Amino acid sequence: MNLVLLFPILIPFATAVACLLAWKQRHVQRVLSITGAVLLQASGFLLLVSVWQSGIRAVQMGNWPAPFGITLVSDLFSAIMIVMAGLTGVTVLVYSLADMDTGRESFGYHPLMHILLMGVCGAFITGDVFNLYVWFEVMLIASFVLLGLGGEKAQLEGTVKYVTLNLMSSALFLAAVGIMYGAVGTLNMADLARHMGTVKQPGLVTTLATLFLLAFGIKAAIFPLFFWLPASYPTPPAPIAAIFAGLLTKVGIYALIRVFTLLFVQDLEYTHALLLVLAGLTMISGILGALVQNELRRILSFVLVSHIGFMIMGLGIFTHLAITASVFYIVHDVIVKTGLFLVGGVVRAERGTYEMSSLGGLYSSNPWLSALFLLPALSVGGIPPLSGFWGKLVLVKAGMETGQYLIVATALIVALLSLLVMMKMWADAFWRDSPGSAAGGSVVSANPVSFESRLVLFCPIGVLGLLTLAAGIFAEPVLTVCSRAADQLLNTEEYIRAVLGGIP
Amino acid sequence: MISLILATAIRYLLPLLLLLSVYILLRGHNAPGGGFIGGLVASSAFALFALAHGVDLSKRVLRIAPRNLITAGLFTAGSSGCVPLFFNLPFMTGLWFETHINVIGKLGTPFFFDLGVFLVVLGVTLMIIFSLMEE
Amino acid sequence: MEVVMSFVIGGLYASGLYLMMRRNILKLVLGIALLSHAANLLIFTMGRLTRGHPPLIPPGEVRVLESIADPLPEALILTAIVIGFGVQAFAIVLIRRCFETLGTDDLDEMRSTDRAP
């Protein structure tokens, strides 16, 4: 039955409603919220298995036949993304059991998180461009409220920037959808893919491609549209920042990969070359920004921007191997970035600050935390056998095969610089002596974290760390799945057939 | 400042506007109208009431907290979409009762979806208006 | 008619962007609202402007006539308006909270998150 396609949307929706019903009982909300996230994760795996076994799945909402109604469709790439959404949801929600203030929790933190997850999963699973816009907005409204929740000064400033840029992007997206409807006469992605080649004015298609690139580029935070990200992501509490960093930017990248493999493949010399240039610039500008920052979460935000370039790079090279690498890199990046932002939250809980200048000595006081930081940090730097190494290796290989030496060189330099940034963080925050201890002050934190809550904080980070290790050691099976996903992305006939069936 | 004209008029306008909102909701399936517009009309009635008599009194007249309206609306809309699943039809397929009911017309899952939208719009709008007026 | 509409849309975009570049935060929200109106009007125009034609099948007929008005752009615009309504309502609450917390409506003074300390 096609119910398996609906679960990723229905489960977060039902959880959000249930959490709203239990508005006053915080503990009930927590139980419901964790259960919902675990169920979402399970449904993601179910979908993955189902798509792996029987190919691309599609279901027509409301029983309206394909090009007229809204289609939900899941290929392997969508299924992988939904698994990642479930993973981020579970880890972040477990983490927030110990590190979320009661004020935010009683003002709807849990329902909002699940509405956010619903929007994200909906965006991954829809087969209709306008419906994609609607899911984007669902996700955005939830993220606006989550970002502003609590109403601290920096938070509100960050929210204004985030809201403005994202609404600009939505307006562009909407305009692009309108022009596309006028030019092609349909909004179903599979139908669009069939008819895109027959549009009389090729210039209009390229214009459309650029508009979509702009709209999704703002959401994915690629160069030169990323400035809202380091201004807003470091402002909310760690769990919210972690789910934003791990998941939300990936939705933009998902949308870019979807439209630039399915719809806009007529003018590769222009669109995909442009993507490649933007990828390179994103990598460089992001990592240079990270080098000069002195606040833990701002460094992480810039590293996040920089590594978005790697995922776009695979799309820009546009060979089978490159798309495989992009998909693999997304999986890696979701795991690692969520983990790093959560580690940042623990550092804050232990020391009460994010400023690198006043951190230090965490290795001697919290050796386990240091180990948990080191795993994703080395993975970001691309140290074997962690998953970051394989992602970069395959990307570089794909670049070498097509002779794109410039972008390969850029990627390698940026990987080295990422390692440098990560090691600088390691040295400043963990390895060196605490600046207070030299002056005879104590390194005891302002509010000591109890053993139980430390256990709850460490568990999700540990799972994420082990996952990046596992994805590195068992890279072969993961890459096989990603390669099948790339197959389906590049051979659009299967997608079109699954959605439109026998319609001529 | 409380306007005497508005304060007097809203006593008669509130039920009328609510009736109008239900009318708009019901005619929405095949004619202009529907849950969103109906919800906006209903919330404008309460917004006018709040302007004339203050937030506290209008909250008491409304009886239900806006947040509960949102919850009920989401629940109604979501479950109306799930009903066809039990008949082995895709999500959100429109199912209708055959019998014609006076005044309301034909009942079906799309109507309940619209009702849910009505409640959500009413709840969200009032929540925003109340929170803006309270501070 | 299309020519008039394109000028209207262009004007809306231009004034929306102009308002967004002002320093006042209220004008920012108004600018965003104008931008989304412009996008809605663009969808409307791109769906072909027709006059006096029925949407799909007129009452009393059983099949689609020669010339019909496309109902889909209207459905898209309606959805976009609903979403725009929600987003703009949130934006108004946000700017009010901003003004209360930060004590200013000048966007140039909201720079603490952009500066490297």
Image (cartoon, rainbow, N blue to C red):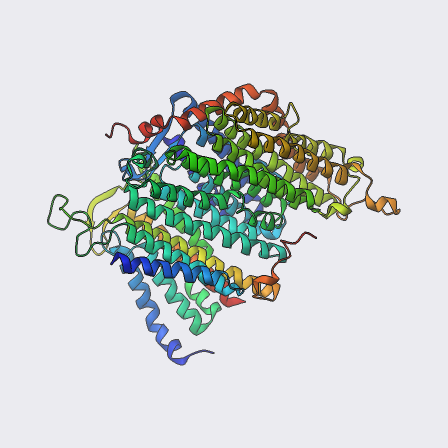
User: Image point 13% across, 46% down: which residue?
Assistant: C65
Residue A49 on image: x %, y %: 45, 24
Residue A189 picture location, percent across and down: 35, 37
Work out whether residue A64 or residue A326 is closer to the camera in this orientation and state it.
Answer: A326
Q: Which image quadrant for residue B87?
A: top left
Q: Is residue A364 visible?
A: yes
- Image position of A11 with respect to A154: above or below: above
Give the quadrant of the N terminus of chain C.
bottom left
Q: Residue furthest right?
A: A440
- Return the x and y of residue B111 as percentages of the image width and height: 29, 49
**Residue at the image point whose x is 42% and y is 24% from the top:** A487
* Front-most of residues A127 and A239: A127
Left/right placement of residue A352 relative to residue A468 reads: right
- Could you tell whether A433 is left or right of A425 in the image? right
| Residue occupying the point 81% across, 38% down | A432
Residue C70 appears at what percent x and percent y? 23, 48
Most distant residue in the bottom direction: B4
Instruction: Judge whether A190 appears above or below A294 on screen.
Output: above
Number of dots carrying numbers: 0
- The answer to whether residue A135 shows anywhere in this view is no
